[in-house]
Image: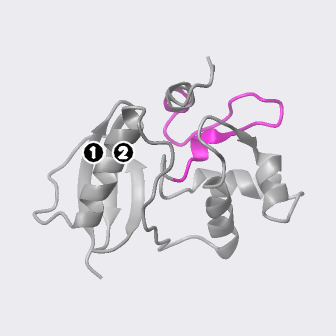
């Protein structure tokens, strides 16, 4: 299967967008931008446009076809549940564990959250500790704070 990569410069750093011709496969934080693929399929251009709208405050719900190329069935279930957390709101790891039907799987939910292959679009930044505190984020807590504040939450 052909894969295409596009480096997107966002307010929280460079994002690596990877897609097939029809689906978003990965969005991750990159240390630096590299050269983009010579061919950029329309799905990547659509993803870029939606990210532009999100970061400008004009988009609150992404509408992109996503395909998980990795992850256990449990992790994929968690990632789908993360997509249900509304813009501007948060949920705890416990909330997600309950939502996926396994209230005792709080740590496993945390592990799945950490392995989320499609950051921002699948909003793992909206998951917080049970106490309401911000805990871990693969891109760094500073990025999590920025994203939550961008979505009109007050976090420091």
Q: Does the magenta segment cover residue 135? A: yes
Q: Which of marks 1 and 2 is in front?
A: 2
**Looking at the image, which residue is at 62% across and 60% down?**
79
Label disc, if present, on residue 8 of the rendered structure: 1
- Residue marked by disc 2: 51
Q: Where is residue 8 in the image (x, y as percent from the top left)?
A: 27, 45
Query: Nearest the camera: 31 or 124?
Result: 124
- In the picture, measured across the screen, residue 127 lies left or right of residue 137, that is right
Q: Can residue 62 be seen in this view?
A: yes
- In the picture, measured across the screen, residue 66 lies left or right of residue 74, that is left
Q: Can residue 30 be seen in this view?
A: no
Q: In which quarter of the image is residue 83?
A: bottom right
Residue 4 position (above or below residue 142): below
> Where does the N terminus fall, quadrant-wise?
bottom left
- In the picture, measured across the screen, residue 75 lies left or right of residue 146, that is right
The residue sitting at the top extreme is 156
Residues at marks 1 and 2, CA–CA distance in whole angstroms: 9 Å
Is there CB contact under 8 Å for labels 1 and 2? yes
**Looking at the image, which residue is at 28% across and 60% down?**
44
Q: Where is residue 150 in the image (x, y as percent from the top left)?
A: 50, 27
Residue 137 position (above or below residue 119): above
Query: Mark 1 or mark 2: which comes first in sequence?
Result: 1
Query: Nearest the camera: 31 or 132?
Result: 132
Residue 59 position (above or below residue 144): below
Q: Where is residue 146 in the image (x, y as percent from the top left)?
A: 50, 26
> Where does the C terminus fall, quadrant-wise?
top right
Where does the magenta region start and end? 122-144
The residue sitting at the bottom extreme is 1
Q: How is the image coloured?
A: one colour
- Mark 2: few, some, or many residues within 10 Å (few <14, many ≥20)? many
Q: Where is residue 76 in the image (x, y as percent from the top left)?
A: 62, 68
User: What is the secondary structure assignment of the residue under circle 1?
Assistant: strand
């Amino acid at each position: 299967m052909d894969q295409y990569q596009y480096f997107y410069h966002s307010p929280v750093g460079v994002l690596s967008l990877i897609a097939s011709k029809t689906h978003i496969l990965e969005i991750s934080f990159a240390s630096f931008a590299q050269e983009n693929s010579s061919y950029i399929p329309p799905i990547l251009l659509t993803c870029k446009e939606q990210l532009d709208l999100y970061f400008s405050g004009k988009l609150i719900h992404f509408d992109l076809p996503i395909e998980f190329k990795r992850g256990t069935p449990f992790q994929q279930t968690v990632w789908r549940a993360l997509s249900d957390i509304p813009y501007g709101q948060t949920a705890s790891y416990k909330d997600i564990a309950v939502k996926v039907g396994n209230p005792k799987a709080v740590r496993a939910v945390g592990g799945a959250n950490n392995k989320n292959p499609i950051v921002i679009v699948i909003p793992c930044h909206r998951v917080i500790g049970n106490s309401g505190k911000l805990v871990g984020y693969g891109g760094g807590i500073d990025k999590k704070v920025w994203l939550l504040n961008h979505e009109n939450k007050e976090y420091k």
